Amino acid sequence: MCNIRIEQLYYLIEVAKTRSIRLAAERSYISPQSLSEAIRKLEQYFGVDLLERSYQGVLLTEEGKMVVDKATLIIKNVEDLKKKFESGSSRRQTSLLTGDLSIIIASYAINNIFYETLETFSNKHSNVNILIKEDDIQKILLDISTGKAELGIVAVLEEFYKEDESSIGSKDICIKPLFDDKMVACVGNKSPLANRKSISMKELLKYPVVIYQAGPWGELRLVNFLKEFGKPKKIITSSNANIFIESIVKGLAVGLSSYLFLKANPSFKNNVTALTLNYNLKLNYGLVYLKNRNLSEAAKEFIALFSAASPLK
């Protein structure tokens, strides 16, 4: 008879919380098939049915409720021991995680939250090698689907998010929404617009506009989006953050930036004036990973840290 593994108990508890195999699998970063198999082995071990399906979703049997009650106590005790050892022994401060973690990230997603997460992760798991690439959403989806990257971080305008979510759903790729960030128009402090507090999208296009976006596909989408508000006077596109920043600071163009991007670049923030847009333009952040790939412990840890650093927490 096989032994019980602690993650099987985690999976059963998640099913109890969500009443869904699919949602429990998504929260656990494994495929629904793998989660179902793990619970099936639990049922074989105990010799009872733990779950039953109903119009309300997947529910626990009476035996399943008993197992979840005991499993919750077991996991709490294990976590309490882990915390005690981590705080009580300097030898436990060094993480046992090793291996590689590959991340592909969208341009606008590189902000203070990402930097804080990367710093915390690197300090805590010094034996994990980290490879970070920057690209647009198309390349992110391609690298995740082909296994070239384990984890993707996207930052997409809300207007494009549903379109991308639909595209992602057809590729065996999962997207986990995290938080939103508001977009503003940034102008150099010496710009004639610097004494303004707000600006409309239509009026914005009367001035040269600089776009910061990695990849030609992302640039094209943003250009087409702007054209919906009128004919732009001039558009500058760049995948280089420094060119984007300097174009605004030196008064060459107006740029669209998020609050988090400003916060992550304090020298940029101090040299520009942020104007409220008379259009509710939001940037949606999300984590992207392959549905049927069991994520490494390093990837799970990075996701947990990134989620915990969210401004909504």
Image (cartoon, rainbow, N blue to C red):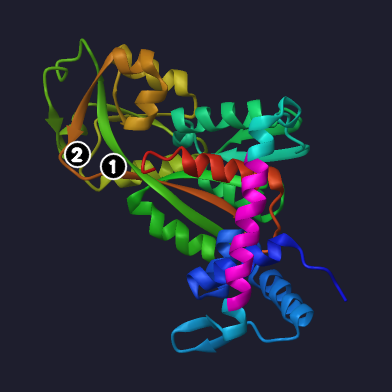
Of residues 208 and 110, the one nearer the viewer is 110
Residue 46, x across and y down, in percent: 75, 80
Relative to residue 260, is residue 278 depicted above or below? Answer: below
Q: Mark 1 and 2 residues: CB-CB less than 8 Å, in contact? A: yes
Of residues 264 and 19, the one nearer the viewer is 19
- Place residue 231 in its image quadrant: top left
Residue 120, x across and y down, in percent: 58, 29
Crowd around label 1: few <14 · some 14–19 · many ≥20 (10 Å): some
- Residue 201: image tag: 2
- Secondary structure of residue under mark 2: helix
Crowd around label 2: few <14 · some 14–19 · many ≥20 (10 Å): some
**Among all residues in the image, which is located at the extreme bottom?**
54
Name the residue type under label 2: Met
Residue 289, x across and y down, in percent: 60, 53
Inspect the magenta stretch and tell me whether residue 187 lies in it: no
Marked residue nearer the N-terminal end (1 or 2): 2
Relative to residue 139, is residue 259 depicted above or below? Answer: above
**Distance from Cα at disc 1 to Cα at disc 2:** 8 Å
- Place residue 285 in its image quadrant: top left
Relative to residue 92, is residue 29 depicted above or below? Answer: below
Residue 228, x across and y down, in percent: 25, 48
**Do we see residue 291 in this rendering?**
no
Q: Residue at x 67, y 45 (%)?
A: 81
- Residue 226: image tag: 1
- Secondary structure of residue under mark 1: helix
Left or right of residue 313: residue 12: right
Image quadrant containing the C terminus: top left
**Do we see residue 5 in this rendering?**
yes
Region of the chain picked out in magenta, as a range? 66-83
Q: Residue at x 37, y 31 (%)?
A: 260
